[in-house]
Image (tube, rainbow, N blue to C red):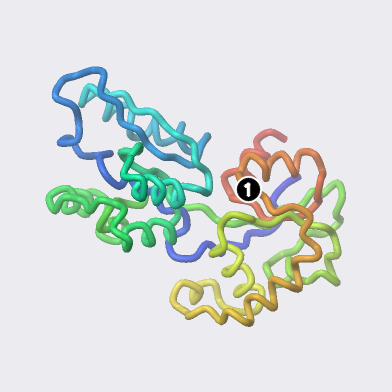
Amino acid sequence: MQPMSWGKSRRVLGAIAVLAICLGLAACGSSGKSSTTLTIGDWGAPIDEATQKAYTNQFDAENHLKSQFVDAPGVQLARVEAQNQAKQIQWDAVDSLDGGSAYTLYAKGQLAPLPAATKARFEKELGAQKVTPFGFSHGSLGDVIVCNTDKMKTCPANMAQFYNTKEFPQQRMFGGIEPIEAVTTAEVAAGMPITQTATTPVNVKAVIKTLEGLKPHIKVFWQSGEQQQQIMRSGQVPLGIMWSDRAYQLISQG
């Protein structure tokens, strides 16, 4: 099994990693109490492991904190909204939140804005294009077309071919948690240049028509990266769309 074709189609900012409240702010540390815990809503392993290695280990040591991750793949927006609605905030920060969800939450007033001095520091260190009013982006990923080459002689080379069910009649797996991904893949399959997807208004009727043509060939709407990998390992379907990091893991595992 290996990704045969790349279909970069994530609208807005790819995977925007938003450390929305405390992470990176020395002022958010405790006053010397080793018991203070920073709770971060995360996408799950291996992203939380990478975040811990790159950021929180050093941050915790410098600020006498202990960071803990709460895995919430694909449901971070819903969890943050629920916490705000209940007035019971359980997370101090959010990591690896997708761009669409991040800006939605910020527009609703559910992400804290960065202090001006911290925002300026981030812009100096990272560049203004990577800093938002509520955090910063530190990574991106792509949606990739993957095939089990033991079961398919050829693999779709682009989104148009992935959506071509006559040329490729095999059953597929497809994302079931992020509508913006489905919309964007449909737009690209219909001929829209990838570079225009972030700025072009969505033709809802055309997108729905394109997705409806593909739907009968989708056997599984996956709900997480772990499920994507399990589906491909088990041979449940020979063709699908995955997140690039999960696909690379499968390659590394042979």
Neighbours of disc 1 within 10 Å: few (<14), some (14-19), many (20+)? some
Residue that label 1 marks: 223
Q: Secondary structure at mark 1?
A: loop
Q: Position of residue 61 (x, y in %)?
A: 26, 22
Is 56 in front, or is 224? 224
- Asked whether, in this view, residue 158 is left or right of residue 59, the answer is right
- Asked whether, in this view, residue 38 is left or right of residue 232, the answer is left
Is 223 in front, or is 137? 223
Is 58 in front, or is 45? 45
Question: Which part of the image, by quadrant, shows the C terminus?
Answer: top right
Q: Position of residue 199 (x, y in %)?
A: 44, 76
Question: Which part of the image, by quadrant, shows the N terminus?
Answer: top right
What residue sits 80% from the left and 63% below the top? 217
- Looking at the image, the residue that sits furthest to the front is 86
What residue sits 62% from the left and 82% below the top? 205
- Asked whether, in this view, residue 127 is left or right of residue 90, the answer is left
What residue sits 21% from the left and 51% below the top? 114
State whether residue 89 is above or below residue 142. above
What residue sits 27% from the left and 54% below the top? 134
What amino acid is at disc 1? Answer: Gln
